[in-house]
Image (cartoon, rainbow, N blue to C red):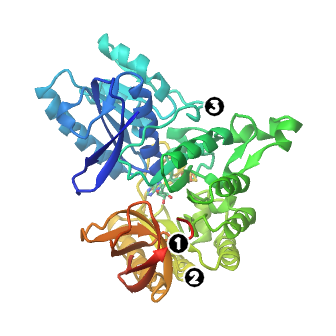
Amino acid sequence: MEKVIEENKQGTSLVLEQNDQNTKKLFIESYGCQMNFSDSEIVASILSEQGYNTTQNLEEADLVLVNTCSIRDKAEQTVRKRLEQYNAIKKINPSMKVGVLGCMAERLKSKFLEEEKIVDMVVGPDAYKDIPNLLKEVEEGRDAINVILSKEETYGDISPVRLNSNGVTAFVSITRGCDNMCTFCVVPFTRGRERSRDPQSIMSEIKDLYEKGFKEVTLLGQNVDSYLWYGGGLKKDFEKATKMQKATAVDFAQLLDMCAGAYPKMRFRFSTSNPQDMHDEVLYVMAKHHNICKYIHLPVQSGSTRILHEMNRQHTREEYMALVDRIYKILPEISLSQDMITGFPTETEEDHKDTLSLMEYVKYDFGYMFAYSERPGTLAARKMKDDVPETIKKRRLQEIVDLQQKLGLERTQRFLGQTVEVLIEKQSKRSDAHWSGRNSQNTMVVFPKENYKVGDFVLVKVTDCTSATLIGEAVGYSEMN
Ligand code: SAH
Ligand code: F3S
């Protein structure tokens, strides 16, 4: 593999890994969650063995792959529009092949080949190793589809090709699938049952990143706190494991402790934490290691216990608040963020007020807020009427977005006058004289470049801020450097 530095549209340099023996061109793009972006790096690695190097230029591609998201209807519409654009290019270049990967592939299966005439290949999230065979079928003029979900697949043996990388931060997936069956969510249907990846393969991927000069790793999973390695197999089958397997099992707190201890000069983040599985051991491990970032993404979806119950979330409002209290007690420096859904079936004004008051209580630094979108096949779609009018969903969404904006600003202001540790990731979007990076709490920080460079850990004195960005001046290297 050879490192190639390219400029992207924003003028930021990208590090691409290319094999100079490869002659075919792959254009791959990803929509949706971080896991999809990480999966695309696995797919690029599998295809690199098949003679494909990635390209940023759609027109010159032999193979176009789109890694898709089904989480809300809008996400699917975006992909459909994109497919129309590929179609226009395919008319000029008919030998170009198009494949759909990820959650939409899994949800729509062969319907894709019937509805979207331009799609040559449909591959679900657990079938990427079959892509070389599927490509042969495409070449022979057959429809190629594999949407089988697996009990074991974690792609632990594949070393991802880093795409659009800044050479500093990377994702490493540690679990796949989800067993939670939140009633609104399509993920358990599209990504299958929960399974964890062998810690040895996780550690060797991190070692490789470290040796390549990466400085920050985000451990990924639909529910990372539920990580449990006992020699392979589904999480739900842990009960059936042998005594030996149980005794030597590795949980998330242990995995995090191992990573942070082995690589003290790298930063570690993780996402996503489901409140029901977030235990105090993880908080203590976070407190123990400076290099585990003091940030937890802790989706709650609603502040109303009644709605949480309807959503099949496994905790009440009060239990969530008690967890937040413990987090602030053990980790006073922490930043928290939420995911919230407005207008879930039967949501009343009272329930909505509970959401607003919970937000005030927690004081989230950031938030990702959505209007409920009914997903075919989910329990909510089958059992509940999508009965909150669109206008009310939108109004409630606006109210929580406005409140989050206010809370975010208050939280960001707490850093004024402080010195924060920043990992430089790239040039600031607004100014080529400034670097941008994040502090441990995940807040963006911009400051004049001076002689610092991408990948440096720098101490920055904060002098000003906007609602989501800190502005300051570097005062020296940090000890992480
Ligand atoms: N555990 C996952 C959650 C994936 S879905 C993770 O790793 O982040 C991301 C977010 O999308 C959810 O937390 C939820 O807030 C939102 N979401 C999921 N299904 C939705 C739906 N049907 N309508 C609106 N928002 C939804
Ligand atoms: Fe979806 Fe709930 Fe799992 S939101 S990904 S079913 S934790």
Q: Amino acid at mark 2?
A: Tyr
Please rate how many residues cluster around mark 2, counting C-alpha atoms within 10 Å: few if below 14, some from 14 to 19, many from 20: few
Q: Is residue 404 left or right of residue 305?
A: left
Mark sitting earlier along the chain (1/3)? 3
Q: Determine if the C-beta at disc 2 is less than 8 A from ligand 1.
A: no
Q: Is residue 69 above or below residue 412?
A: above
- The mark lying in front, picked from 1 and 3, is 1
Q: Which residue bears the numbered disc 3?
A: 152
In this view, which residue lies farthest toward the top? 140
Q: Which residue bears the numbered disc 1?
A: 478
- The mark lying in front, picked from 1 and 2, is 1
Instruction: State the CA–CA distance, disc 1 to disc 3.
Output: 41 Å
Q: Does residue 198 appear anywhere in the picture?
A: no
Q: Which residue is at 21% across, 38% downward?
A: 57
In this view, which residue lies farthest toward the bottom? 417
Q: Position of residue 389 (x, y in %)?
A: 36, 65
Q: Does residue 451 appear anywhere in the picture?
A: yes
Q: Amino acid at mark 1?
A: Ser
Q: Is residue 160 left or right of residue 289?
A: left
Q: Amino acid at mark 3?
A: Glu
Q: Which residue bears the numbered disc 2?
A: 361
Contact (Cβ within 8 Å) of mark 2 with mark 3:
no
Q: Is residue 206 left or right of residue 319?
A: left
Please rate how many residues cluster around mark 3, counting C-alpha atoms within 10 Å: few if below 14, some from 14 to 19, many from 20: some
Numbered disc 1: secondary structure: loop
Numbered disc 3: secondary structure: loop
Instruction: State the CA–CA distance, disc 2 to disc 3.
Output: 41 Å
Of the pair 126 and 403, the residue shown nearer to us:
126
Please rate how many residues cluster around mark 1, counting C-alpha atoms within 10 Å: few if below 14, some from 14 to 19, many from 20: some
Q: Is residue 119 left or right of residue 88?
A: right
Q: Determine if the C-beta at disc 1 is less than 8 A from ligand 1.
A: no
- The mark lying in front, picked from 2 and 3, is 3
